[in-house]
Image: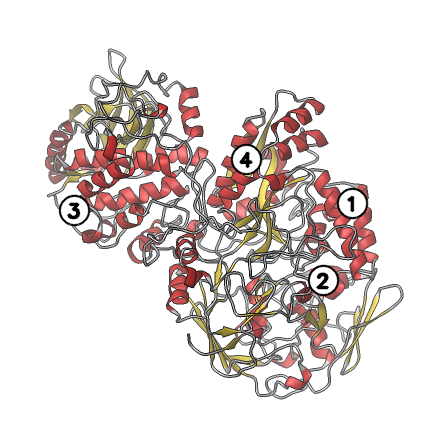
Amino acid sequence: MGRYRILARLGAGGMGRVYLGRSTSGRMVAVKVVRAELAEDPEFQRRFVREVEAARRVTGFFTAAVVDADPLGSPPWLATAHVPGPSLEAAVRAHGGWPRRSLLYLGAGLVEALEAIHGTGLVHRDLKPSNVLIAADGPRVIDFGISILAESSVLTQAGMVIGTPGFMSPEQVAGSAVGPASDVFSLGAVLAFAACGVGPFGTGSAHSVNFRAVYSEPDLRLLPPGTDFVARCLEKDPARRPTVPELLAEFAGLLGEGSGHTYGGGHAQQTDWLPEAVAASLAASGSGGPPAGPAPAPAPGAPAPAPDAATPASDPRVPLAKGPAAPPAMPSTPPAMPSTPPPSLPATPPAIPVPVGVPLAGNPYAVTAPGPYPPGPDGARARTPGRARGRRLLAIALGVVLLAGGVTAVILRQKDDPAGKKDQQSQGDGGQKGAGTDGGTDGGKGGQKGEGATGSTGGFDGAVGKVVNASDKKGGTLRLVSSSDADSWDPARSYYGWVWNIQRLYARTLMTYAAAPGEDGLAVVPDLAAAPPEVSADGRTYTFRLRPGMKFEDGTPITAADVKYGVERVFSTDVAGGPTYLVDVLDQKQGYRGPYKDTGTSGLRSVETPDDLTIVFRLAEADSRFPYLLTMGATAPVPRRHDTAARYGTRPMASGPYRFSSYQPDRSLVLVRNEHWDRATDPLRKALPDRVELTITTDQDKVDQQLLAGTADLDASQLGLTQATAARVLGDPKLKAQVDNPYSGYIRMAAMISDVAPFDDLDCRKAVVYAAGTEALRTARGGPAFASLQGSMLPPTVRGADSYDPFGLTGGKPRKEEAERALRACGKPGGFTTKVALNSNNPKDSAAFTALQNDLKAVGIRLEAVRFDSVPAYYAALGSPKIQREKGIGMLMLGWGADFPTGAGFLQPLADSALTRTEGNSNYARVKDPAIDELFRKASAETDDAEANRIHRQINHRLTDGAHYLPLTAEKTVNYRHPRLTNVYVHEAFNLVDVQALGLGEEP
C-alpha cells in the first residue's frame, strides 16, 4: 500500500481494515485502508480528504501520529505510527481490571488525546478499548476509523454501524448529531471497562447493548472509590457531561497538580503507572522501555518527589498542569477504604446497572438470561442456576467488585473482626459468638446460641441473631421489590433461595425450618405434619400424620394424597426445574416417570397413603438428610385436579396464609389473605400483613432507589445493595442502622483436580494453599463487607462448621516459606504451571484469579487462564472431566452453596467419590478419599442429629487437610430493611430475612 509493504492484518473497524506495514527504511506503521463501498461515495471522499488534513494536525503525545496518507487513492488509505504494545482491551482481558492509580493515569492520557483530536475539529466517534494502545510511557489513541469532522453530517448508509456497541453515546446510537461530548461518553465507557473488565452496558447482541446505552443506567458497581468522574462522563444528556477542559483540570487535581507536573499515562520510559502484570508483560515483550533515569532536582522550595515520580527533563509531553516541582508520589496500590466512607460522598448514589436474567457476581449484563445447569447425577434434568441454593455455582457468582492489583471495594470493618475471622453470623452489636469446637455437642451450628429469641430495636446487623422490632400488630401492605422474577412460583420447580423464602407465604411443606433467628432457625420442625415422624429402628421408614383441618384456598381439605402427588410431580421430566433429591432417594429402580406419564394406579411405590392423614416414606437405606429434603417445595400439597403442569407456577393452589391475587410475569405479584387458612393449624406463620406486593424490575438501581426512598420495605431477593449504594449507606449512620451484613451461605473456592498432575500430590496442593494471600482475595471479592476470610470448607452458617484453619488462611497473608517447603516435598522446587477454568463474564472471578496468580507467581507457580465466554460453556466445563482433560485444566474457580444447611448438604456433592460423574459432576476436585467416603456413609446412617454434625465436622477437617479445595472467602451481603418493618431477623437456613415473619409498624 503506497510505499509500505503489508505484513499482517491487525484488525478491522466500521469503515476499514488495519494492517501492519513496513516502510522501505524498516519503519513500522499501521496502515488503515478504507472500505471499498465507502471509497466509491463522493461525499465520503470529500470528507475523508478533509479528515486526513485535520488528522495530520493532531500532534498530541497520546495519539498515534499520521505519517503518510493517500486520501484519493484506490482505495484511500492512511498510515500512522505503529505502537508496539497491546490494546487496552487485550491487556484487561489478559490481566484483569486496573486499580484506581493506573486508571487515573490512563484517563489523563486519554483526555489529553481527545483535547488534541478535538482541537483540530475532529470527533473520534469510535473510542473503545481496542483503539487504545498501551505503551510504556502512556496510552495512545488510534484509528481514524469513524473520526469525522465535527461539522459533518451523520453517515446514513443503510446497514452501516457507526461506532461500537457499548461505547457509543446515546445520541450516536440514535443517529443524532454528535460532537466532543459524544467522545466524552465513550471515554467513560472505556474507563469503566478498564476498571471492571467488562463494559458498563454489558455484552450480548448489538441491539441489546445499544438499548441499554440509551435507556438504562451503566453498571458501575465494580469501580474503585474515587472515580465518580466515570459516571459523570456517562450521563445520557450530553449537556450534563463534563467537557474535555473540565476533565483536564480534574485529572490534574487528582494527580497532584498543586506541586508539579502531572502526566497522563506515566513518566517517559517508565511503566510504574501500569498494573504490575501489564508492566511485566510489556517488559517481557520488549516494549516496556528501559528503567527511568534519576529524577530531576525539584525547584527551590518544592518538596522532594517520591522515587517513582522521576521524570526526565526531555519528556516531550505537555503536562496537564505546570508547576515548579514534580508531583507527590502516588501509592503503588490504592489505599484501603476507611471503616465507613467519608461524609463527602454524594447525596445520591451514582448510576447503577440493569441486571437482566439471574444476577451474577459482577456485571449482571454479562449474560442476559440464565443458562441451563449441567445435567445432574444419573442424567437428572438440567437445573437452573439462581441465588442461593447449592447444587449450583455462583457464576457469580452473586456479587460485586474488582480487583487485586486492581479495584478496591466498599470495606466494612467489623470491630471484632480485623482479619475477617468471623465464624458465625455477627451479632447486632457487632460482636459474635465464639466458634464451636470438636469438644462440644454441636459447636459449629453457625448461629448465636441462646440469643435466637432476643429482641432488638435495630441498628447495624440488628437482625442477625436477633429479632428487630418484635410485634404482633396486624394489617397493612408489605412492599417487596426484586430485580428479577422467580424462576418459578411452582414450589416444586423453583431453585432460587429467595423464592423458597417467599413461598412460605403461600405454600406449606411437610416439614420446614423453625421461625427463629440464629441457630434455632436451623431446626427442622413439622409444618403440614402434626408432629415429627415416627422413624423405624433401621432408619428406613418415616411415618407422618398430617394436621387435621387444613384446607386449600378453595376450601377443600388437604390430604396425604395431595402431598404424595406433589412429590410425584418432581419425577416428571415434562416440567423442568427445582431440586431432584427426592427422585434419587425415592425412585429405587422403579423408573417412575411422574404422574403425567404414569399409567399405573399406585403411583410412586416408595410413598404410601393408607388414609387421608397418613403418609409413609420407605427408603432403600437410612439417610440422615431425609428430614431436610422434606422441607423443600416438592412436599407442598398439590390437588391433582388443579395441576396445570408447566403453567402451575403462574397460579399455584395456596395451602398457606396467602393466595395469589394477581401475577404479571416480570412485572408484579400480589398476594392476599387466604380465607381458608386456619391459624390453629399453623403455629409457624404469623401472617401479619393483609397484603403482600412484589414489584419486579430489571433495574437494580431502581431497587436500591426504592429501598432508600422508603417506597419498598425489602429487597425480596436480598442480593445486597450495589457497591455504590452500599458505600453511601454505610457512610450514613442513620441509614447504616437499617443495614444487616449476613453471610450468604456461599464459599468461593478454587478446586485442585486431584487426579491431574501435579495436584495428584498432596504437597503440591498444599503449596497452592500456603502461597495464597486471602486478604488480597477478599479485597477482590469486595472487602469485609462482602466477604470473610475462611479457613475450611464449611461456611459459618452450616451445621458442623467451626473455626478450623490448618493453613492459617484467616491470617490473610501468603505463607511463602511453607509453600516453598511443600514444593520441595512434591518434587517441584522451581514451581509448576497449571491451567485454571475461568468464567470470562464474572469480573469478581477475574479479580480473584489475578490476585491468586500474583501470589502464586512469587513461589514459582504459574497460573494460566482458560476462559469461557458464556455461562453455559463455563458450567459445562466445570462439570465435565472430559472437557477439563481436553483443555489441560488443573484448577477450577467457582462458588458453592448448600440446598440445606448441613455438612451433607454442603460437603457431600463436593467430596463424596460415589457422586463423581462423567457429566454434571459436582465433585470438582475429584476427591477420592476412602476415609471421607466412609464418614459420609456413617453420617448418612446416623439418626442423632448432633452426632451427624460431629461427623460432618470431621469430614470438613479431613477435606481441608487434603487441600483439595482452596477456600477463598465466605460470601456476605449488605441488605437494607425499612425501619417500619417488625419481626425482622435473618433466617440462617436461607441466609435471608424471614419474609413470613414480617409485620408493619408505624412509618418513621
Q: How many numbered markers are drawn?
A: 4
Q: Which residue is mark 4?
A: 852
Q: Which of marks 2 and 3 precedes in the sequence?
A: 3
Q: Which residue is mark 3?
A: 154
Q: CA distance from mark 1 to mark 3?
A: 68 Å
Q: CA distance from mark 4 to mark 3?
A: 47 Å
Q: CA distance from mark 2 to mark 4?
A: 39 Å
Dot 2 amino acid type: Val
Q: Which residue is depicted at the point 81% across and 57% down?
A: 947
Q: Which of marks 4 and 1 precedes in the sequence?
A: 4
Q: Which residue is depicted at the point 38% across and 41% down?
A: 195
Q: Relative to 132, say whether 982 is above or below.
A: below
Whether residue 770 is visible? yes
Dot 3 amino acid type: Val
The secondary element bearing badge 4 is classed as helix
Q: Which residue is mark 2?
A: 583
Q: Relative to 355, say whether 243 is above or below.
A: above
